[in-house]
Amino acid sequence: MTEDAQAVKLYLDDLTVGQRFTSPSHVMELNEIREFAGRYDPQFFHLDEELARDSLFGKLAASGWHTAATTMRLLVQSLPLAGGLIGAGGEISWPRATWPGDRIHVESEIVTIAPSRSKPERGLVTFRSETINQDGEIVQVFTPKIVSWRRGAVIAGA
């Protein structure tokens, strides 16, 4: 977790539509791509460079789920919400592949803030999070709804 994310904890009351957050970056190393694929998405185009040449990708590509998992880590490092990042749904898409050696980071913007009517101590915040490679290309779009707590709510880790 970044020093800023550890020091500052944001509550529902602190957030505004349009507020932006940027993560640190992460390089998608070939060995990491193969290890993840071997454990969670063992398809030839994530594991074997030679066989991947005849795939839709034309070369070895990271699993979209690996990109998603790395994005989650980067979100934890860059969205300092009190109580953590508790998902309540969302959408995900991969407009382009992530390749070995890509340096990715996440840029997130608050799209909506909806205080709960039945649970006044919290609300839902919808983010649009774009995972972007070193060339400025979007490799993933994630639109999560995250539980956010109001200041004064009793929550662990806040």
Image (cartoon, rainbow, N blue to C red):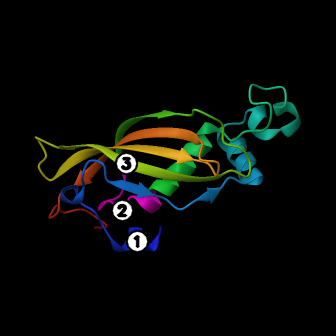
Query: Label 2: few (<14), some or many (≥20) within 10 Å?
Result: many
Q: Which image quarter is the C terminus in?
A: bottom left
Place of residue 75 in the rendered image (x, y in percent of width and height, measured from the top left): 45, 54
N-terminal of the pair, mark 2 or mark 1, is 1
Crowding at mark 1 (Cα within 10 Å: few <14, some 14-19, many 20+): few
Kind of residue sitting beneath label 2? Pro
Residue for point 64% across, 48% down:
135
Verify CB contact (< 8 Å) between mark 2 and mark 1.
Answer: yes
Label 3 is placed on what type of residue?
Glu
- Which image quadrant is residue 56 in? top right
Q: Name the residue under label 1.
A: 4
Mark 3: give few (<14), some (14-19) or many (20+) Cα within 10 Å. some
- Magenta span covers which residues? 76-85
Q: Per the image, is 84 magenta?
A: yes
- Toward the front, the furthest residue is 136
Going by the numbered disc 1, the residue's amino acid type is Asp
Which residue is pictured at 54% across the width and 44% down the height?
A: 68
Q: Earlier in the sequence, mark 1 or mark 3?
A: 1
* Residue 118 - label: none
